[in-house]
Amino acid sequence: AQEEELAQADIVIDDLIELKRILPAVQR
Protein backbone atom coordinates (compact mmCIF):
# COMPACT_ATOMS: atom_id res chain seq x y z
CA ALA A 1 0.00 0.00 0.00
CA GLN A 2 2.79 2.40 0.85
CA GLU A 3 4.57 1.67 -2.42
CA GLU A 4 1.45 2.64 -4.37
CA GLU A 5 1.23 5.93 -2.49
CA LEU A 6 4.86 6.69 -3.27
CA ALA A 7 4.32 5.91 -6.94
CA GLN A 8 1.31 8.22 -6.97
CA ALA A 9 3.36 10.95 -5.30
CA ASP A 10 6.00 10.62 -8.02
CA ILE A 11 3.29 11.08 -10.66
CA VAL A 12 1.93 14.15 -8.89
CA ILE A 13 5.41 15.64 -8.59
CA ASP A 14 6.01 15.07 -12.30
CA ASP A 15 2.74 16.86 -13.06
CA LEU A 16 3.73 19.79 -10.84
CA ILE A 17 7.12 20.08 -12.54
CA GLU A 18 5.40 20.17 -15.93
CA LEU A 19 3.02 22.87 -14.71
CA LYS A 20 5.94 24.95 -13.44
CA ARG A 21 7.48 24.72 -16.92
CA ILE A 22 4.23 25.49 -18.74
CA LEU A 23 2.81 28.30 -16.60
CA PRO A 24 5.64 30.84 -17.09
CA ALA A 25 5.39 30.35 -20.87
CA VAL A 26 1.61 30.89 -20.75
CA GLN A 27 1.85 34.00 -18.59
CA ARG A 28 4.03 35.88 -21.11
Image (cartoon, grey):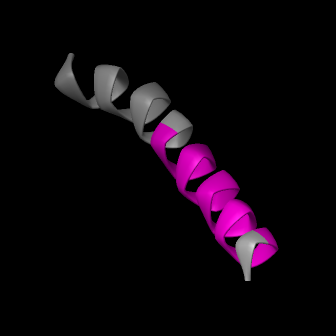
The residue positioned 48% from the left and 27% from the top of the image is: 21
- For residue 23, side relative to residue 19 (left or right): left
Q: How many marks?
A: 0
Q: Nearer the viewer, residue 23 or 2?
A: 2
Check if residue 9 falls in the magenta segment: yes
Q: Is residue 8 left or right of residue 20?
A: right
Is residue 5 a member of the stretch shown in magenta? Answer: yes
Taking the view exactly as shown, the residue that stands out farthest to the right is: 3
Picture quadrant where residue 24 is located = top left
Whether residue 27 is situated above or below residue 8 in the rendered picture: above
Residue plotted at (54% across, 56% down): 12
Q: Is residue 28 above or below residue 19?
A: above
Q: Is residue 22 above or below residue 9?
A: above
Residue under the image location 19 percent in, 23 percent down: 27
Please identify the quadrant where the C terminus is shown: top left
Left or right? Give the position of 19 relative to 27. right
Main SS, magenta region, reads helix
- Residue depicted at x 42% and y 29%: 20
Residue 22, percent from left and from top: 41, 34
The extreme left residue here reads: 27
Q: Horizontal and vertical percent for residue 13?
A: 57, 45
Q: Quadrant of the N terminus?
A: bottom right
Q: Which residues are magenta?
A: 3-16
The one nearer the camera, 26 or 6, is 6
User: Farthest front residue?
Assistant: 2
**Depicted 22 relative to depicted 4: above or below:** above
